[in-house]
Amino acid sequence: MLSITCLFIFSCGQEGDTVDTININDTAGNAQNKAIKTKNVFYSIPSPIETTTLLKKAGATYDAAFLNDIKSASKYTSASSKALNLGVYGADLSFTSIFEQAQESMLYLKCASDLANGLGIGDVFGPATIGRVEANMKNKDSLLEIISDAYWTADAYLKENDRPSTSALVIAGGWIEGLYIATRIAKTTKNDEIMNRIGEQKLSLENLIGLMENTPAEEVITKLTAELKELKVIYDKIEMSSEKPVTSTDVTTHVTTIDGGSKVNITKELLADITLKIEVIRSNIIK
Amino acid sequence: MKLKNRCFSAIFAVLILSAGAVSAQCSKSFVKKQCMPKISPFTSNGQLNSTVMLAGQTAELMLNFSAGLNYRLLICSQEVLGAVEFKLMDKDRNVLFHNMQAKGKPDFWDFNVKTTQQFIVEVTIPVPTKTNGIIPSGCVSVLVGFKEK
């Protein structure tokens, strides 16, 4: 915009010069030539609500011991630790809500609210949200909608206010806590489907690293990205068979299914390594 | 005289472009009011992926979809951009869905996957047949929603 403006202003005093670099003709071809040909690349990470929903479907059970201590919320004083732990408590809140633990959900919501206040986005988890959560405590679907909406609003606010690092840290905190909870459940249940779900996070981890690398390189971002890359070294050892995806649409329901794709084969040894590594990464965040 | 006219035209064009730029801001309220309702009855993944794009520009979003859930992929954009094109592709860029080849050129697609997969969504802004000297720009948001099967 500035360069276009400068060209116009410059053209006022330069009778002999032409400004045809921005004097676009009414033809599609010319317009296309003038359009800026940059390609923006973004990364989307599965939300903790999505991950926890899958864990419950796979047979996970609730255990409060897997979650971050609510008393720890007051320990997080730096902006980066608040952002990371807003993500952590968001995942914990998703976990308590999906397993319909009303009292715990309110406690984790309060933690999220305190950290959001500290980050200047207090309205998102303010009295209005708390009131909606209280009113829908017995309706799991509505509750998840409210939580999802609150985290979406927080993310939108941070991006709109040019705080991409804070946004990335919240997302990373949520993903890390989700994986940590999954490894705890796998350790206690030895459930094969949950083990596979953990293995499938290989794809999400690639996107999370992409998101972090796309974020302004502040020290906390660089450090966390390095830790995630160490986790990726373990994940890279997981075998993934890959078939070309094929789509088919059910003529009755009109729902399209994509078959093929990747299948993971995670060994107990690799699961143990992932469990250990994610525990270390998480410990550095919640300490 | 010629110089004055030229200056006037240039300033006028700058004002129009400036106004366009302001209206093209990807505000939270635009996405919340215009886009989020369209993701229902799916639950949003809680992330805002929006950007201001110009006619002819392309953007890509890398995302994962898990087996066991139904998904809605929604491309929401300001009217000034016209019918926005999007393709869902696998990592090898094989096209799995192309909205411009689908009936009604929809701005969303509902689907599920049998195994967890990593896809690329490519969004392209059409170039208008007539520009009146101005390249349109506007907000584009890619939203992902999920629900249990």
Image: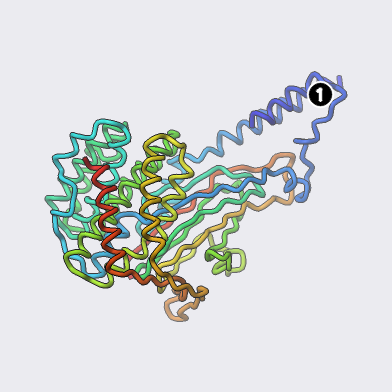
Give the SS element for disc 1.
helix
Residue A87 quadrant: top left
**Residue A30, position in %: x, y?**
78, 46
Disc count in the image?
A: 1
Picture coordinates of residue A238 (x, y %)?
38, 66
**Residue at mark 1:** B5
Residue B111 visible in rendering: yes
Using the image, determine if residue A171 lies above or below residue A77: below
Q: Residue at x 61, y 54 (%)?
A: B124
- Identify the residue at image location x=50%, y=73%: A245
Q: Is residue A211 above or below residue A196?
A: above
Q: Residues within 10 Å of mark 1 (few under 14, many from 20)?
A: few
Whether residue A256 is visible to the viewer of this picture, yes or no, is: no
Near-viewer residue (B46 or B28): B46
Q: Is residue B84 left or right of residue A226?
A: right
Q: How is the image coloured?
A: rainbow
Amino acid type at mark 1: Asn
Which sits in the foreground, A4 or B128?
A4
Question: Which residue is at 27% across, 60% downward?
Answer: A52
Dot 1 falls on which chain? B
Q: Residue B130 vs residue B69: left or right? A: right
Q: Measuring 22% from the left and 38% from the top, which residue is drawn there?
A: A127
In the rendered image, which quarter contains the N terminus of chain A?
top right
Expressed as whole percent of the image width and height from the top left, the position of residue A10 reads 75, 22
Residue A8 rendering spot, x and y as whole percentages: 74, 26
Quadrant in which the C terminus of chain A appears: top left
Viewer-side residue, B42 vs A103: A103
Outermost residue toward the bottom in this view:
A251
Q: Residue furthest left?
A: A103
Compare residues A204 and A282 and report the one nearer the observer: A282
